[in-house]
Image (cartoon, coloured by chain):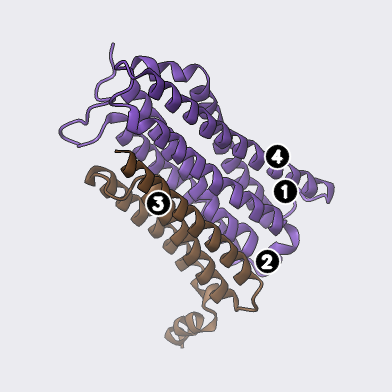
Chain colours: A purple, B brown
Amino acid sequence: MEIPYTTAARPDTGLTNPKLGIWLFLASEVMLFGSLFSSYALLRAGAPTWPDQSSIVNVPLATFNTVVLIASSVTMVMAWASVAPHAATAWHGNDAITTAALRRFRLYMGLTLLCGAVFLVVKGIEYGDKFSHHRYPWTSNFLGLYFTMTGLHAIHVIAGMIVNAFFIGPGTRMWRSDPQRFANRIEVTGIYWHFVDVVWIFLFPVLYLL
Amino acid sequence: MTRDIAAQVRGYLMVFGALLVLTMVTVGVSYLDLSEAETVVVALTIATVKASLVALFFMHLKGERPMVKWPLALTAFLFVGLLVSVLYSEADHLFGARFQDSFQSIGD
């Protein structure tokens, strides 16, 4: 069975189905993270005292991670820009351009994966540092929120990396068989990845700077 | 076609630069001796600008169809509603005696 409207826009929505699907999924994700952000607001506003967060967390490491994640968003959008313009003409005897586009795509997608891995390693270092100071999720309300929110975010990074890895590897076959659909898949994957970046853009000031 | 892409890529790099500058600004501001309320407003304003840049340019929300924009607008409304309702329940802590007094004066 063929999935409808993967490359052509559905007349009533004006969108391809994957595009509408990813945005509806992200809307639900906004509310998932929204429940955690509002829990943070409730617990902090109601607390008689709140620790100086920047004395518990590592601001320089988190700043570095912010830059890494923003860079990964740029490489992700560059990966899409490598294939998207050639999708319409790919594989119409234009071999060299099609292959060069895929090579550029793989380079940028590889850099995106690398940035994701660096982010997770730095996050792991931060967690290890907390544990070595006997700071656990059950130690305080702040640490409970810190581990829950950054942990859920890290799971999203891992999920995105699995999808990105698929598109560097076996997923690239579609670039030969159905280039437009492949480019659309990369755009939709990118929209998810940028959302993970957006969540971090809010987590960083809330958990580290306020 | 190639020139369009070059312009697009230049745009992405400019957004990248803006995001880096805003990251440095928000970290820098956190070292200033601002009140808690000022810190919250400045940090969240900068975060919102950064998130908007990512959404508009990287996620192609700029020029996207209404079928994407309307459900997102509804989501944003519900998200803000959730936060406001939570903060309202703690208004006496957040805004101090002013709120408490107004209720007490009713009791008096």
The alpha-carbon separation of the residues under discs 1 and 2 comes to 15 Å
Question: Quick check: A85 left or right of A123?
Answer: left
Mark 4: few/some/many CA within 10 Å (<14, 14-19, 20+) = few
Q: In which quarter of the image is the C terminus of chain A?
A: bottom right
Tell me whether circle 4 and circle 3 mark residues in contact (CB < 8 Å): no
Q: Residue at x 38, y 49 (%)?
A: B57
Task: Give above or below for B41 relative to A84.
Answer: below
Q: Can residue A45 be seen in this view?
A: no
Q: Earlier in the sequence, mark 4 or mark 2?
A: 2
Q: Which of marks 1 and 2 is nearer the N terminus?
A: 2
Mark 2: few/some/many CA within 10 Å (<14, 14-19, 20+) = few
Residue type (three-letter) at the residue carrying disc 3? Gly
Residue type (three-letter) at the residue carrying disc 1? Trp
How many tags in the picture? 4
Task: Give above or below for A114 relative to A30.
Answer: above
Callouts 4 and 3 on one subunit: no
* Residue at mark 2: chain: A
Q: Earlier in the sequence, mark 1 or mark 4?
A: 4
Q: Where is residue B21 in the image (x, y as percent from the top left)?
A: 54, 62
* Residue with the mark numbered 1: A138
Mark 3: few/some/many CA within 10 Å (<14, 14-19, 20+) = some
Nearer to the camera, A18 or A50: A18
Q: What element carries label 1?
A: loop
Which mark is drawn over residue A121?
4
Q: Position of residue B97 (x, y in %)?
A: 54, 83
* Residue with the mark numbered 2: A50
* Residue at mark 1: chain: A
The alpha-carbon separation of the residues under discs 3 and 1 comes to 45 Å
Tell me whether circle 4 and circle 2 mark residues in contact (CB < 8 Å): no
Q: What element carries label 4?
A: helix
Tell me whether circle 3 and circle 2 mark residues in contact (CB < 8 Å): no
Q: Position of residue A45 (x, y in %)?
A: 57, 67
